[in-house]
Amino acid sequence: MKQRAMIIVNPSSGTEKSVQFKQNVYTILVEQGYIVKLKETSKEGDALNFATKASDDHFDLITIMGGDGTINEVINGIAEKEVRPSLHIIPLGTVNNFAKALELPLKPQQAIELIKNSKKKQVDLGKINDSYFMNLVNIGAIAEATYQVTAEQKSKLGSLAYLIEGLKKFSEKDLFSVTIATEETDVQLNVMLVLVALTDAFGGLKNAISEAEVDDGYLHVFAFKEITNLESIAMLKNLVNGQLKDQPQIEYWKTKNLNIESTPDKVANVDGDEGFSTPLHMSVLEKHLTIISQDN
Ligand SMILES: Nc1ncnc2c1ncn2[C@@H]1O[C@H](COP(=O)(O)OP(=O)(O)OP(=O)(O)O)[C@@H](O)[C@H]1O
């Protein structure tokens, strides 16, 4: 029987390049022997619904033309299904954190052509309360900063927009109390930020979280205690060099299960978008997603 592929296109993602590449994707999938269905999103939630349907109808492949927000919806549509389509990612967003973490080609045509070599990689998926994430959860300074970044700033400055807003927030010294419970520890701290990473890319910076690998089966947890303006500059340098945990004001754990409570309650940023309020429970589904990739 012929294999089936669904193309999920978000025409509004990033630089709106999907129009230019849609036909190429379609043609290449047909050439590879797939029966192809093309679906365009028109609003939030569409990509999730299309992906759920693709899984229920036993599609073999979903090609995603969009940014991290669209990928996050697709993984939420397939995460709980027994049989999950492989994912072929054409990064058309502004930040494309997930594609960077997976070392996928960022040029759309190269990403499209990956389907020809049919290499697949199994990667971890994170669960947060009743939802799923593939990149990063954070609460505190950076999360709040991301809610203040406008679409215009994001498309002009990309990842930098978040870092600039995040740094402004750091200088406000907005400390809050958290309880962090992992398999090995149960601590109460005053922090500015808690960051939970599944991959090594942060805000589009590859290798920023050098401890994390996409298939290592762990959540990587960083708690940022009070940091002065001067220290935040050193911290930026450590972030760029992948040495966050060398910063004395940062505590680090790796774990498979995590509970976070905070006072006051804080809304977490999940894969770049506003998510749940604390308390949060997180866990890892090891090698749960299959991604068309450059290597196995
Ligand atoms: N046709 C549409 N018009 C406007 N918004 C849409 C449409 N279809 C989907 N959306 C919304 O657009 C959001 C953002 O898309 P996406 O994350 O793919 O792009 P991006 O923000 O440019 O990329 P990145 O997250 O990598 O920076 C999606 O989460 C979805 O809610």
Image: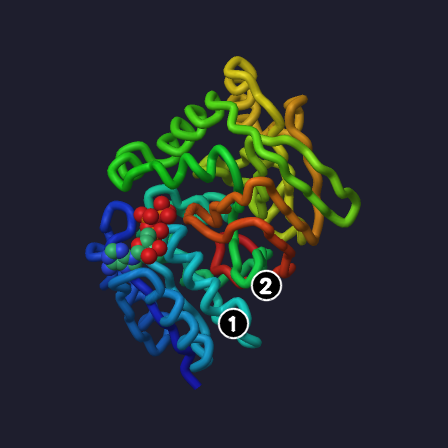
Q: Residues within 10 Å of mark 1 (few under 14, many from 20)?
A: many
Q: Residue 227, percent across and down?
A: 57, 21
Given contact means CB atoms under 8 Å apart, are the residues at marks 1 and 2 in contact? yes
Indicate left or right for 164 with 243 as reference.
Answer: left
Quadrant showing the C terminus: bottom right
From what the image shows, is residue 135 above or below residue 71? above
Q: Secondary structure at mark 1?
A: loop
Residue lying at the far left in this picture: please name it: 19
User: In this figure, what is the number of numbered marks?
Assistant: 2
Q: Which mark is residue 84?
A: 1
Q: Residues within 10 Å of mark 2 (few under 14, many from 20)?
A: some
Residue at 42% x, 57% y: name it.
71
Q: Residue 153, percent across and down?
A: 28, 34
Q: Say which amino acid is labelled 2.
A: His
Residue lying at the far right in this picture: please name it: 184
From what the image shows, is residue 141 above or below residue 90? above
Colouring scheme applied when the structure was drawn? rainbow
CB of mark 1 near ligand 1 (< 8 Å): no
Indicate left or right for 263 with 276 as reference.
Answer: right
Q: Secondary structure at mark 2?
A: strand
CB of mark 2 near ligand 1 (< 8 Å): no
Quadrant showing the N terminus: bottom left
Q: Residue 160, percent across and down?
A: 38, 30
Q: Say which amino acid is labelled 1.
A: Arg
Q: Please name the residue that numbered disc 2 is placed on.
A: 288
Residue lying at the far bottom in this picture: please name it: 1
First of labels 1, 2 by sequence position: 1
